[in-house]
Image (cartoon, rainbow, N blue to C red):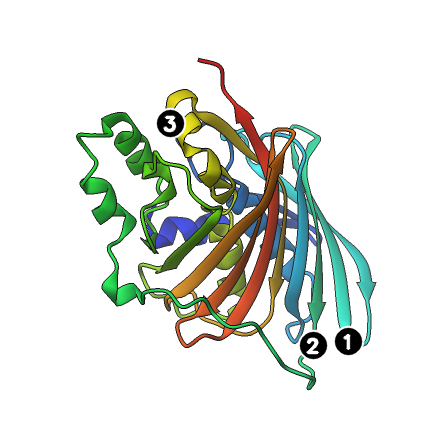
Amino acid sequence: MDIDELISIVTLKKLEDNKFEGQNYKTVWGRIFGGQVLSQSLHAAYQTVPENRIAHSMHAYFILPGDLNEPVIYEVDNIRNGGSFTTRRVVAFQKGRAIFNMAASFQKDEEGFDHQIQMPNVLSPDLLLTDFEQAEKFKEELAERYQIFLAAHPKVFDFKPVGTNIFLRKENALPINHCWFRLKDKIDMPLQFHHQLLAFVSDYQLLATASLPHRKEIAKTRAYYASLDHALWFHRDFSINDWLLYDMKSPSASNSRGFARGSIFKEDGTMIASVAQEGLMRKLKK
């Protein structure tokens, strides 16, 4: 997938005033990628709010696996138009069945208090290998996993893991993960579009962080992952063209579910977003 294809995927076709249609990113695992419907649903909501209202949060539930061969229809409910905030609900349908729903809130610019946590002290992206460069070293030792990695990778983004990429790990570790990312080809588009692309990429690696304490077992038996819910808060303006650090931690995994939280920072330490996700992390039988 290149940048033109990504733009075409996250930009929906308008069918009616509050109804839109989206095409699918062709995944190798045979289901619609969660980041796709996150970004498309945010696009649909943005089409129905005033231009001076910017998304500050979105909360989504994945209801059914999406069919790659069917377009996704998004219907937007205009829940509230307030003096400072605008609220929208978006439901995604395939074959007349709801597969996903999302609520988003938008706000006009306002002056207020300002503070943030400190960015983790990790190596800068210029000192790190890309995940492709890392994987190349394992292409013979982990041949099958290497091929899966190549096929599943959203190549429109650059990723530079701090440490070994999760999918190449065979030893258990603390459920803490850091990864730099940015769009490979620069875009000159409004902030709203950068929000949509951040929603797309925020679903990559976050849930897998919950697998880190279990890599030995997963290396032998594998695991099935699927997003259940996803929340994203936009704190400050940013550009998806620039390196961003994804600081991910998983406080808990239980009952075949993994939970993870993320904070996203600019290279200068400015915190631009927060993420939380719970997903199915089910053991597969041999």
Q: Secondary structure at mark 3?
A: helix
The residue that appears at 68% across and 86% down in the rendered structure is 111
- Label 3 amino acid? Ala
Image spot of residue 267 (x, y percent): 39, 72
- Label 2 amino acid? Lys
Give the number of marks.
3
What label does residue 108 carry, if any?
A: 2
Cα distance between the residues tagged 2 and 3: 48 Å
Q: Are marks 2 and 1 in contact (CB under 8 Å)?
A: yes
Q: Is residue 178 left or right of residue 106?
A: left
In this figure, which residue is indicated by the disc labeled 3?
219
Q: Residues within 10 Å of mark 1 (few under 14, many from 20)?
A: few
Q: Is residue 189 left or right of residue 77?
A: left
The residue that appears at 82% across and 62% down in the rendered structure is 80
What label does residue 84 carry, if any?
A: 1
The residue that appears at 42% across and 35% down in the rendered structure is 26
Q: Residue furthest bottom?
A: 111
Q: Secondary structure at mark 2?
A: loop
Q: Looking at the picture, tell me which residue is in the foreground, 205 or 156.
A: 205
Image spot of residue 122 (x, y percent): 37, 65
What label does residue 217 carry, if any?
A: none
Q: Residue furthest top?
A: 286
Along the polypeptide, which appears first: circle 2 or circle 1? 1
